[in-house]
């Protein structure tokens, strides 16, 4: 049943950046760039071995300079420029590919590689260098107090109230390229359905939450997303 839509919330995960050459979290070997997630993406890991964690994020930050937005990022940016109704693109990704493609109505719920958080003065600011050497904070001038501005396991994702409000108002919730393994993001589809939204998943293979969606389209984001954006922009239906 096709319905008219006005307000859209889109959630993306690592799968939307896979065709740009950015590693996903749960590859075949279950490791993430050779590490167990709990060894590099928790506050406890940062206390236990700050050098390992800083190196892990310095390498991923540096890699961003070698990759480009793909057709999925570009199609979502085109939707952002054109859609007259409400639109919020919530990404779990910490890469800058949605930003570089031009998406404006964008929210990084798990932080960004190109941002630093000073533990001395609590400043959050754009950062593109390497952190392992203990650079000075440009705000408080204290050296060696920067951490990646990333939401680790056990930490509260950013702007949850804004996300919940958008989910309560949306007519359409679209999930793209995520395994549905991590909460609270994995629960957004249930919140959207509770509020009466239609729900669509586009993913390379079934996710842990596929059964929650009204519709699931299996395939590569670089192929599925541009077709879906064309469909929405030409008919305003889903
Ligand atoms: C919190 C930043 C509370 C790091 C990330 C037990 C039950 C339920 C929940 C929990 C539990 N125990 C603990 C929790 C909470 C925990 C959680 O959910 N754990 C899981 C493991 C069970 N969650 C948290 O800790 C969150 N915080 O709950 O706070 C709180 C309350 C009060 C006060 C304080 C705190 C915080 C979670 C955030 C962690 N940070 N990222 C970094 O990037 O360095 S998570 C990370 O994994 C991602 O950001 C993402 O969110 C998540 C899942 O990754 P995906 O993006 O889905 O990637 P994945 O590889 O898994 O899947 C890729 C998909 O793409 C696949 O399905 C694949 O098929 C598809 N794909 C591949 N190629 C393509 C494709 N699709 C299309 N096209 C392609 N070409």
Image (cartoon, helix red, strand yellow):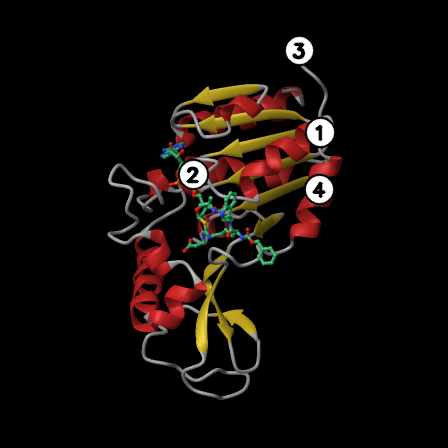
Tag of residue 194: 1
Residue 16's tag is 2
Which residue is painted at 30% across and 54% down in the image? 66
Q: Earlier in the sequence, mark 4 or mark 1?
A: 4
Q: Is residue 34 above or below residue 45?
A: above
Q: CA distance from mark 4 to mark 1?
A: 13 Å
The residue that disc 3 covers is 1
Q: Earlier in the sequence, mark 2 or mark 1?
A: 2
- Whether tag 3 and tag 1 are in contact, CB under 8 A, the answer is no
- Which circle, 4 or 2, is nearer the viewer? 4
Judge whether 238 appears above or below 25 on screen: above
Is residue 171 left or right of 148 when viewed as pictured? right
Check contact, mark 4 vs mark 1: CB within 8 A: no
Residue 124 pos. (x, y %): 55, 71
Work out whether residue 172 or residue 212 is closer to the camera in this orientation and state it.
212
Q: Secondary structure at mark 1?
A: helix
């Amino acid at each position: 049943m096709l319905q008219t839509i006005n307000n859209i919330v889109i959630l993306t995960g690592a799968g939307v950046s896979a065709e740009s050459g950015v590693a996903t979290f749960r590859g075949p070997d279950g490791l993430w760039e050779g590490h167990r997630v709990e060894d590099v993406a928790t506050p406890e890991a940062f206390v236990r071995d700050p050098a390992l964690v800083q190196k892990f994020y310095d390498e991923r930050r540096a890699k961003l300079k070698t990759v480009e937005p793909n057709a999925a990022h570009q199609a979502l940016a085109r939707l952002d420029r054109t859609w007259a109704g409400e639109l919020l693109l919530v990404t779990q990704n910490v890469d800058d590919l949605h930003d570089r493609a031009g998406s404006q109505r964008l929210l990084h719920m798990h932080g960004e590689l190109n941002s630093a958080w000073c533990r001395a003065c609590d400043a959050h600011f754009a950062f593109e260098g390497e952190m392992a050497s203990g650079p000075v904070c440009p705000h408080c001038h204290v050296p060696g107090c920067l951490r990646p501005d990333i939401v680790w396991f056990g930490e509260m994702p950013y702007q949850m109230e804004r996300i919940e409000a958008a989910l309560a108002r949306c007519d359409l919730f679209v999930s793209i390229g995520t395994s549905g393994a991590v909460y609270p993001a994995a629960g957004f589809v249930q919140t959207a359905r509770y509020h009466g939204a239609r729900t669509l998943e586009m993913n390379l293979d079934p996710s842990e939450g596929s059964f929650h969606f009204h519709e699931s389209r299996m395939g590569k984001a670089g192929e599925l997303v541009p077709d879906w954006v064309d469909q929405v922009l030409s008919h305003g239906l889903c």
